[in-house]
Amino acid sequence: MIVVALAGPLAGSCSKWNSDTPGEREDIILTRVQQEILSNSNGFGIDLFREMCLEQEGKNVFISPLSASLAISAVTNGAAGKTLEDMKAVLGFGPYSPDQMNGFFKHLVPALKAVDNTIKLSIANAVWIEKTFPVKNPFIQSLQQYYDASVNLLDFSDPKAPSVINQWCADNTNNLIKKVIDRIDPDKRLIYTNALYFKGKWEKTFDKKVSWQGSFANLSGTSGQVTYMEQTSQYRYTVAKGVAVAEIPYGNEAYSMVIALPDAGVSVTDVLSSLTWEQWTGWMENLSPAELNLRIPRFRVEFDSEETMIPVLTRMGMGIAFDPCKADFSNISDIRLFISLLKQNSYIQVDEEGTEAAAVTTIGFNLTSIGPGQTIPFHVDRPFLYFIKEKSTGTILFSGLMADF
């Protein structure tokens, strides 16, 4: 079994925010090939988010596309033949060699950590191997060289083994993700965990004294009570067919939250159904400064995709990896394996100070058998989409649908 645990940003304590003065932002420099790989990776992230939301049929969703891409890419090093081809194709890495794919992440991950001194961002990796299971050295070496993964032999039959892995996840997500597995199936052989932690303070924090209680028009047709945060300031903003989009920066503006608010009378499901990488790119290219009266709710979401991620990725073209008769992970071991578990646990909290978020992706392998001077209201009082991204590369760390409170 291989479990890939991706944790969204590790957060410090909710009440303690980084008080450092934001340093000057420096763009992340990518080669032409790396830019192509990133664009394809973000395209995968948008497609995964859209399909996860549609699979959930109107429920709140919060995932980390970056975590999913990192986790699946890491274990792709163990795939061969058509399994390898299909996994790379779904990730958007079809035209590129494993070295190019791995080298891209080796370059991107430390660069993402360095662009804002006020953001807490950490990414940790570990591989847990059942102590009697033979794993090929090149697979382990790839995880160490490109993903900086620690290698741990573990007695999977020991009742305490799950708690060892869960504690690692808790330690690397500031206790936001405390449990990824309850027990280890007797057929499981290898677990890969990746933890990504993020905590960011708004560039312009909201004054708690002006926060107020109000209603939110839920997608289900009911009305929820929320606490609205509000301020009027300059933000980047655009309008497109059926939607208004605003970007709210953190720290030195290297990271931001993008909120896509459907027009009154337009369902967020309709916006989701047509969401593509090309549409996302259009939104980002058309953002321009505007004075907004920004009103957004405080919110917290916990999400577990255990029942949905394998069906979604199967629809997207990766079904062979989950088929015990066809999966080929012969670059992990000569003993036949297939992916029997793939899910993501995630958490986000948004308040007047900023955002704290985490996501853990788990992959388990079993043995086979408008203009200046005008204040524009941007009142987020109905279902909306939200994203956390890095500015210079456009890397999407997290994506969410807030349907109901």
Image (cartoon, helix red, strand yellow):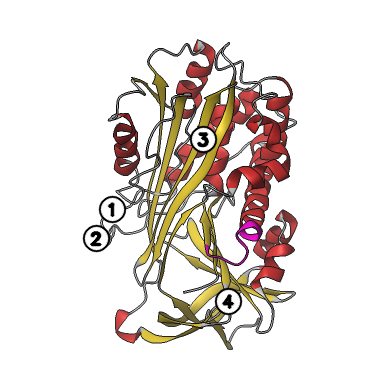
What kind of element bears circle 4? Answer: loop
Reading the image, the residue beneath label 2 is 16
What percent of the width, then of the height, locates residue 81?
72, 20
Residue that badge 3 annotates: 363
Residue 150: % across, % down: 38, 24
Judged by depth in the image, the label closer to the viewer, 4 or 1, is: 4
- How far apart are labels 3 and 4 at the CA level? 32 Å
Alpha-carbon span between mark 4 and mark 2: 35 Å
Question: Looking at the picture, which amino acid does disc 2 mark?
Answer: Lys
Q: Is residue 58 magenta?
A: yes
Q: Quadrant of residue 113?
A: top left
Q: Report the residue at 51% width, 77% height from top.
A: 234
Q: Which residue is mark 1?
A: 12
Residue extent of the magenta highlight = 53-60
Query: Cβ–Cβ below 8 Å for labels 3 and 2?
Result: no
Q: Nearer the viewer, residue 178 or 311?
A: 311
Question: Looking at the image, which residue is at 30% across and 49% down?
Answer: 175
Mark 2 near mark 1, Cβ–Cβ under 8 Å? yes
